[in-house]
Amino acid sequence: MAPARKNEPKPPHDLRLGEALRPRTIGPEEFAGDLMIEDAVIPDIALPGEAAEFAEISGSRFTGGSLADTDWHRSSLVDVALEGVDLANSRFVESLWRRVHLDRCRLTGVVLAGCIVEDAVITGCVLDFANLRFVQFTRVRFEGCTLTGADLVEAQLHDVSFEGCDLSTVEFSQAHCQRVRIAGCRLDGLRGVGGLAGATIAPTDLLALTDQLAGALGIRVDWEG
């Protein structure tokens, strides 16, 4: 096996889910109380617009349904899988995601500003216009995701990879990158390119950043000359 390259992001730690998850349904009254979910599978949840504080969800799987427009304050998701769940415009405040897998979820306008996200795999998800300011990403892999218009101002990105993602018009101003890799991504109109200092970018992707990089250095590119 070839040794890992020096700047290659470390992979996320594996999700820890038990083999015998118990089916469970969640109602509005339980969601609004001291919500605790452990070792459960929740199909087709339908609680848009609800609010939870100090919720603790661990070792569980959500399949389908909607948690759109929900509010989560000081809540934690640990060892949680979400498949095809609508989380559009949901807001997480002072919350933690650890060993979380999201597959084909809708997260348009999601707010994770200032949250901690560790050991996450996010596949085929839509995170357009997501508020990811000041978020702390550690060992996070985005695969085939759409992040157009997402805001990562002053985000901390450690061991993060973007593979086959649409990063058009994403804002990276004052982001901090350590072992970040971008490969096979769309980068049209990407903003705050200086925030990607320290990142590794595939050669084919680098061409799309020519104008932004030149602009950051005060260089004019004469494409006609």
Image (cartoon, rainbow, N blue to C red):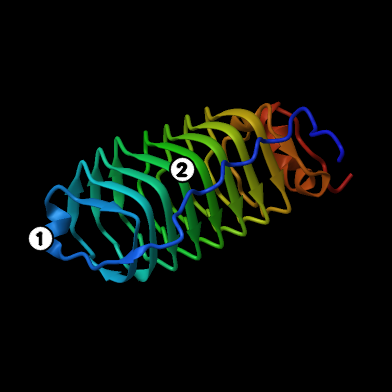
Asked if one can make out residue 167 in the rendered structure from this viewpoint, the answer is no
Mark 2 burial class by Cα count in 10 Å: few <14, some 14-19, many 20+: many
Quarter of the image where the N terminus is located: top right
In the rendered image of this protein, does residue 153 appear above or below residue 128?
above
In the rendered image of this protein, does residue 64 appear above or below residue 117?
below
Quarter of the image where the C terminus is located: top right
Q: Amino acid at mark 2?
A: Asp
Instruction: Give the Cα distance between marks 2 and 1.
Output: 33 Å
What residue would you read off at disc 2?
151
- Where is residue 176, by image quadrant? top right
Residue at point 26% right, 67% down? Answer: 24
Q: Is residue 56 left or right of residue 129?
A: left
Residue at point 48% right, 57% down? Answer: 102
Q: Amino acid at mark 1?
A: Glu
Q: Is residue 108 left or right of residue 22?
A: right
Mark 1 burial class by Cα count in 10 Å: few <14, some 14-19, many 20+: few
- Where is residue 135, by image quadrant? top left
> Mark 2 falls on what kind of element?
loop
- Judge depth for marks 2 and 1 and give the one in front: 1
Residue at point 46% right, 49% down? Answer: 100
Q: Nearer the viewer, residue 82 or 183?
A: 82
> Mark 1 falls on what kind of element?
helix
Q: Is residue 154 left or right of residue 12?
A: left
Q: Residue 69, image x and y in percent? A: 26, 59
- Where is residue 2, by image quadrant? top right
Q: Nearer the viewer, residue 178 or 149?
A: 178
Q: How many marks?
A: 2
Q: Is residue 29 left or right of residue 13?
A: left
What residue would you read off at disc 1?
29
Q: Residue furthest front?
A: 20
